Image (cartoon, grey):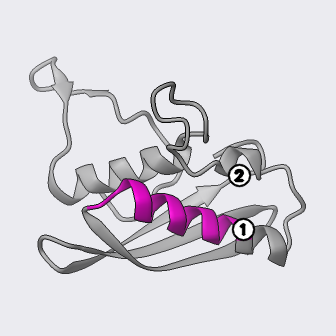
Amino acid sequence: MTSEIHGFSSPFRINPATGGVAGAAGSDKLKENIIHVLLTATGERVMRRDYGAGLRQLVHDPNNDALRAVVQHQIAKAVGRWEPRVAVESVRVAADGENLVAEIRYVVRRTRQFQSLSVPIGLGGI
């Protein structure tokens, strides 16, 4: 899996070799978990109402510096809180036409390796 995600697919996949559920491991699993936090709307989980980043609520706001600052803050806050295996080093949100692209740089605490993830955020949802 590359560090750049274009066109999200479900984390649930079938392993073509075995016909069973394909699972991710290591850094790929960690990236999937970060994306899961970002894709989950705040309040969506019944037993954890504050889980998620709440980005879907923001995608219809005007694409300006204020929106990018809010998205950057929401990402850093959500990943920092809900993915304890990483330390967020930086989050940069830039405009890409009408869409946003979030570049998340983090350190895996166990291995002390730097990783990065590029997440496109579209106006019709992420």
Q: Looking at the image, is 28 positioned above or below residue 44? A: below
Q: Residue 17: tell me if it is visible.
A: yes
The residue pinned by badge 1 equals 70
* The stretch drawn in magenta includes residue 123: no
- Specify whether 4 is left or right of 32: right
Residue at horizontal 65%, vertical 55%?
121
**Residue 106: image location, x then y, percent:** 35, 75
Looking at the image, the residue that sits furthest to the top is 19
Residue 25 position in % (x across, y down)? 15, 48
Residue 80: in magenta span: yes
Mark 1 crowdedness (10 Å alpha carbons): few <14, some 14-19, many ≥20: some
Q: Give the extent of the magenta segment.
A: 70-84
Name the dominant secondary structure of the magenta segment.
helix
Residue 92 x, y percent position in the rendering: 58, 78
Mark 2 vs 1, N-terminal side: 1
Q: Which residue is mark 2?
A: 122
Left or right: residue 94 compared with residue 3: right
Q: Measure the alpha-carbon separation of dots 2 and 1.
A: 15 Å
Query: In the rendered image, which quarter is residue 63 located in?
Result: bottom right
Q: Is residue 5 left or right of residue 23?
A: right
Kindly identify the amino acid type of the residue bearing the numbered disc 1: Val
The location of residue 2, given as percent across then percent down, is: 33, 61
- The residue at 67%/65% (across/down) is 71
Residue 109 relative to residue 1: left or right: left
Residue positioned 33% across, 29% down in the render? 12
In the rendered image, which quarter is residue 93 located in? bottom right
Residues 6 and 124: in front is 124
